[in-house]
Image: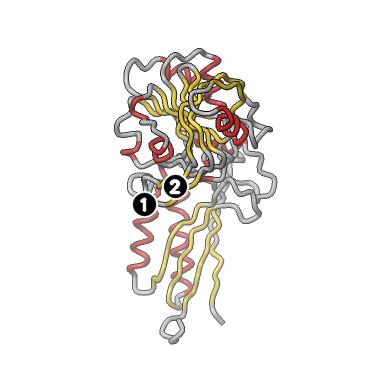
Amino acid sequence: MLDGNIRPVTARVKIPALVRGDEMITETGAIRECIQLAKQIEASEAGLSAGVMWGNPFTDVPELRTNSIVVTDGDEAAAAQYAVDLANRFWKHHEKMQVPLTGLAESVRLAAEVDSGTVVMMDAADATSSGASGDSNAIVRELMRQRYSGMVLAPVVDPVAVQKAFDAGIGATIRTTVGGAFDRARYEPLEIEARVHLLSDGVFRSESFGWHWNSGNTAVLKADNYTLVVGTKPVSLFDRSWFYAHGQDPEKFDLVVVKSPHCEPHMFADWCAKVINVDAPGATSANLQGLGHTICARPIFPLDDAVEFHPTADVFRRN
């Protein structure tokens, strides 16, 4: 561009869709068809760059949507047509680009039916890597309500509970509440009596990339059949490192709460007995209709019914 050898032209098609779930996995989901077409466009004579950008549904902003983007070298007509083609290929699959969710109470009943192996309950609604607060106790509360008898491992952020554990010391028994530390609109603090099993400074490295993470002072609390890893501040939970760093092996438990929409298969899916995507309350719920959007352009799938799509390319060029 600086040498004047190419003259980029960009075409964008606005797609009224918010999407989530396994169909967005680039190697195995329906989105791979769009990626294959994007690669073909980039390999064409005029193509410079192509792709689909699906918006983050947890950011309620005027420009929230999905876009197809194509950049060509000076060919406005090709850029526009390619962007439309890419958008149409995406729209063909948009209805299945959602997460099949199981209600909270039903999820616990299904977990109780598993005779052996570990059940993983995916709580993507409180995914800290997606921007949630990490202080949900919704699944633990329901497990207790239904008197689930298996050994449970769950993460939660609650600075006050951590401070009580540090004040009491390892081996002490404390009465405290856990959860609802930040998002009081969704979570009510849950009262428990627990033994302080472990205390740490919360400094560790992620299993996935070796990144330095810090959950602040962190306590492991044991309350009957529940082991809670309780942090002072959120860290990403898309792998097992926070559990491992605090002496907890998920494979040793009957049920593990995982606060992430996706994990690499070897983390949980490849060895666990069952994975349940739970329709729990939370700021990053895949149940998008319940998030309360008020700013983004409407209509948009899946917030509205019978959304129509008539692709039109906007073209942007250098003067």
Q: CA distance from mark 1 to mark 2?
A: 10 Å
Above or below residue 69? Residue 150 is: above
- The percent coordinates of residue 67 (x first, y second) are 52, 57
Are the two marked residues, 1 and 2, in contact with CB atoms closer than 8 angstroms?
Answer: yes
- The image quadrant of residue 251 is top left
Residue toward you, 30 or 240 = 240
Who comes first in sequence, dot 1 or dot 2?
1
Q: Is residue 152 left or right of residue 115?
A: right
- The percent coordinates of residue 107 (x first, y second) are 47, 22
Q: Residue at x 43, y 42 (%)?
A: 238
Which mark identifies residue 33? 1
Numbered disc total: 2
Q: Amino acid at mark 1?
A: Glu
Residue toward you, 234 or 198 = 198
Q: Quadrant of the N terminus?
A: bottom left
Residue that numbered label 2 is attached to: 92
Residue toward you, 106 or 134 = 134
Which mark identifies residue 68? none
Residue toward you, 317 or 177 = 177
Q: Secondary structure at mark 2?
A: helix
Above or below residue 153? Residue 5 is: below
Q: Residue at x 41, y 43 (%)?
A: 23
- The percent coordinates of residue 66 (x first, y second) are 53, 53
Q: Amino acid at mark 2?
A: Lys
Q: How is the image coloured?
A: secondary structure
- The percent coordinates of residue 53 (x first, y second) are 49, 56
Q: Secondary structure at mark 1?
A: helix
Task: Characterize the local packing of mark 1: few (<14), some (14-19) or many (20 or more) Cα atoms within 10 angstroms.
Answer: some
Q: Quadrant of the C terminus?
A: bottom right
